[in-house]
Image (cartoon, rainbow, N blue to C red):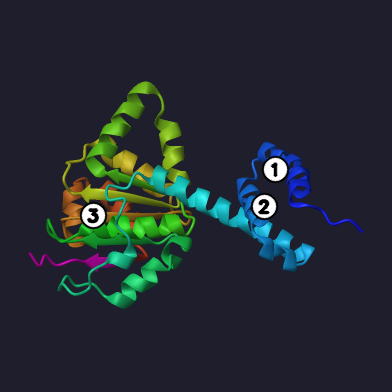
Amino acid sequence: MMLTTTTEKTMLTNPTIETLKTLKLQGMIQALEEQQKNPAVNALSFEERVALIVDRERLYRDNQRRTRLLRGAHLKVAAACVEDINYKAARGLDKRQIAALAGGEWIRRSQNLLITGATGSGKTWLACALAQQACRQGASVLYWRVPRLIDELHVAHGDGSYIKFLKTMAKASLIVLDDWGLTAFSTQDRADLLEILDDRINVGSTLIASQLPVDTWHAYLGEPTLADAILDRLVHQSHRIELKNTG
C-alpha cells in the first residue's frame, strides 16, 4: 500500500481549503493549515482531528463576535477591564459585589446598575470595565454620554429616524448612560428617555454613571409624573455602587 506524500496531501487539501473559503469557515481553514504543518497530528484519529478543526471554528467565531461587540459598544475607555480594577484605594468597592457583577447574571436577568460618585472617583472607567466584560460574555452593549444621547434623539426626531433609533437601543443587552445629571431635560427629553427605558423592562439592562446621588434624581428629572415613571424603571431591582473620591 502506497503512503500519501506531503505534496500529495497538500494537493488533496487545497480544494478543500478553497471550499472552506467559499463557505467562510476561516477557523477551520486555520486549523487545517496548521495540521498540514504538524506531523504530530498523524498520531490522532480521524475523529480527533475533525474535532480539533470544528472546535477551532467555534473559537474563531466566538472571538469574532466579541470583537464586533466591543467595536459596536463604542466604550469611552475601551481598555478598561475588570481584571485591572484597583481595590487598594478606599473607593468603597466591594470585591464580592464586583465579582458577582462581572459574572453577568444581572444582565441575564435584565437588572440595572447605578454607579454614583464625585468627579474623579472612576465611575466611567468602572462602567466601561463592566461593559467590556459583558461584551466578552457575548452581550451586546451601547455606550452613550447622556448629553450626546439627547442630541442624537433631537436629530432622530428631525430626520424621521426616531423609531429606528429606539429599536436599536432596545436590541442592546446593556446600555450605558454616562454623565447622567450634566444635562437639563426638556419635557420631550424626559418622554424620550421613558420610551427607551420602557422598552427595556424585563428584556435589557441599563447602567447609569452619575455624579448625583440617586436620592436627588427625582428633583433632577423635574416633572414629577415622568420622574416617577423613569425612576420606577431604573431603580427597581437595581444594583448600586457608591464610589468615594480618594484623590
Frontmost residue, 144 versus 162: 144
Residue drawn where x is 25% and y is 49% of the image: 178
Q: At x 37% / y 22%, what residue is drawn?
A: 159
Secondary structure found at label 3? helix
Residue in front for this viewpoint, 136 or 1: 1
Residue at image mark 3:
124
The residue sitting at 37% across, 48% down in the picture is 197
Q: Which mark is residue 17?
A: 1
Residue 229 x %, y %: 32, 51
Decide whether residue 224 is among the magenta residues: no
Q: Quadrant of residue 102?
A: bottom left
Name which of mark 2 and mark 1 comes first in the sequence. Answer: 1
In this view, the residue farthest toward the right is: 1
Image quadrant occupied by the N terminus? bottom right
Is residue 187 depicted above or below 140 in this figure? above
- SS of the residue under disc 1: helix
Residue furthest to the top: 159
Residue 157: % across, % down: 34, 27
Q: In x, y percent, where is residue 82?
A: 33, 65
> Which corner quadrant holds the C terminus?
bottom left
Magenta-colored span? 239-247
Local packing at callout 3 (Cα closer than 10 Å; few below 14, some 14-19, many 20+) is many
Residue 166 shows up from this direction: yes
**Number of marks in the rendered image:** 3
Q: Are marks 2 and 1 in contact (CB under 8 Å)?
A: yes
Give neighbour class at mark 2: few <14, some 14-19, many 20+ (Cα, 10 Å). many
